[in-house]
Image: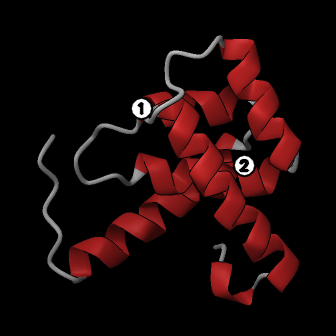
Amino acid sequence: MVQVSKLPQAQRLVLAELSGVARRYGNGTDRDAPRDQAVAAVCDVTTDPELLGIQAGVAMADPHGISGPTVELLRAAGADMDVAAQHAAEVRARLESQGTRYDHE
């Protein structure tokens, strides 16, 4: 179990930047950029498989089911997908406990 709030501040800052870059290239304004450019942009933020996995887990827990491209981008950048699956389950459980419903199931 990864508790993001327990990570060192430097890692939390990396995750914040990673979130923005991954979203931009996965589903955002740069979604049509060449794949190697998108992977390079993510890797410029971090190549840490655990941090990439944490962010992939957040994307996997998307209640609207639209973050698949972001998950695939983070996977291509080297995300630890075991960490991603664990973190997705934790995020999903937290969201469901707060009343979030999953549209795409």
Q: Which mark is residue 91?
A: none
Percent position (x, y) of residue 48?
A: 87, 50
- Quarter of the image with the N terminus is bottom right
* Residue projecting furthest to the top: 34
* Residue at mark 1 to residue at mark 2: CA–CA distance: 14 Å
Q: Amino acid at mark 1?
A: Gly
The one of 45 and 30 positioned closer to us in this rendering: 30
**Residue pictured at 47% horizontal, 32% vertical:** 29
The first of marks 1 and 2 along the sequence is 2
For disc 2, the marked residue is 52
Q: Position of residue 91 (x, y in %)?
A: 43, 68
- Judge from the rendering whether residue 1 lies leftward or rightward of residue 78; answer left or right: left
Residue lying farthest to the front in this orientation: 29
> Which residue bears the numbered disc 1?
68
Tag 2, which secondary structure? Answer: helix
Residue 77: x percent and y percent?
76, 31
Q: Is residue 94 above or below residue 41?
A: below
What x and y, as percent, mark residue 57?
Answer: 53, 53
Residue in the foreground of this view, choosing between 30 and 6: 30
Pick the quarter of the image with the C terminus: top left
Query: What kind of residue is marked 2?
Result: Leu
Helix, strand or loop status at disc 1 = helix
Residue drawn at the location 35% of the way across and 77% of the way down: 94
Q: Residue at x 11, y 48 (%)?
A: 103
